[in-house]
Image: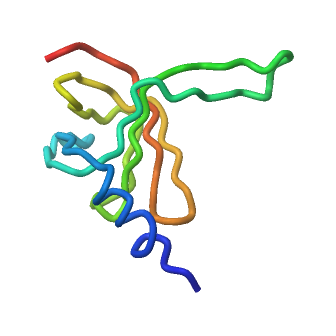
């Protein structure tokens, strides 16, 4: 079996990740590494024609969290404050945190 977290997700975070101040629902603040995409394009096929939405997204390694990230948690990235609006966990040890921008610091 392939250890995706050790062989892919972890090394990718080490190369492309940047520091993110993260606050979970319990108010615990900590620093993680994340791959930030300010303008992630998401295509929804449930509409005709398909709808395209552009929003900020943070790729994270779930091993960096005590529990899986949740909607409503906060991140400070490059001086901007964001709230997690959706968590998309994959089966390889990573997750996409779909974000909403709150304000610049």
Quadrant that contains the N terminus:
bottom right
**Residue 36 quadrant:** top left
Q: Observer-nearest residue: 11 or 97?
A: 11
Q: Is residue 26 above or below residue 103?
A: below
The location of residue 14, given as percent across then percent down, is: 28, 60
* Residue drawn 43% across the image and 40% down it: 97
Residue plotted at (45% across, 57% down) = 94
- Please name whichever residue, 91 or 36, is drawn nearer the observer in this view of the structure: 36
Q: Is residue 18 left or right of residue 72?
A: left
**Does 4 sit above or below residue 37?**
below
Image x and y of residue 102, in percent: 29, 16
For residue 20, which quarter of the picture? top left
Residue 61: % across, % down: 37, 58
Name which residue lies at 22% across and 51% down. 32
Instruction: Tell me if 77 is positioned left or right of 93 in this view.
Output: left
**Colour setting:** rainbow
Residue 36 or 68: which is nearer the viewer?
Answer: 36
Residue 46, percent from left and from top: 80, 26
Residue at 61% over, 29% down: 42
Quick one: quadrant of the C terminus?
top left
Q: Residue furthest bottom?
A: 1
User: Considering depth in this image, is 70 or 12 the residue closer to the camera?
Assistant: 12
């Amino acid at each position: 079996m392939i250890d995706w977290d050790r062989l892919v997700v972890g090394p990718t975070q080490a190369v492309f990740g940047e520091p993110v101040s993260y606050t979970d629902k319990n108010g615990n603040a900590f620093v993680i590494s994340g791959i930030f995409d300010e303008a992630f394009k998401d295509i929804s096929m449930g509409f005709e024609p398909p709808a395209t939405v552009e929003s900020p997204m943070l790729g994270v390694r779930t091993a960096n969290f005590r529990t899986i990230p949740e909607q409503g948690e906060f991140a400070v990235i490059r001086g901007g404050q964001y709230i997690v609006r959706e968590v998309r966990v994959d089966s390889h040890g990573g997750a996409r945190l779909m974000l909403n921008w709150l304000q610049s610091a």
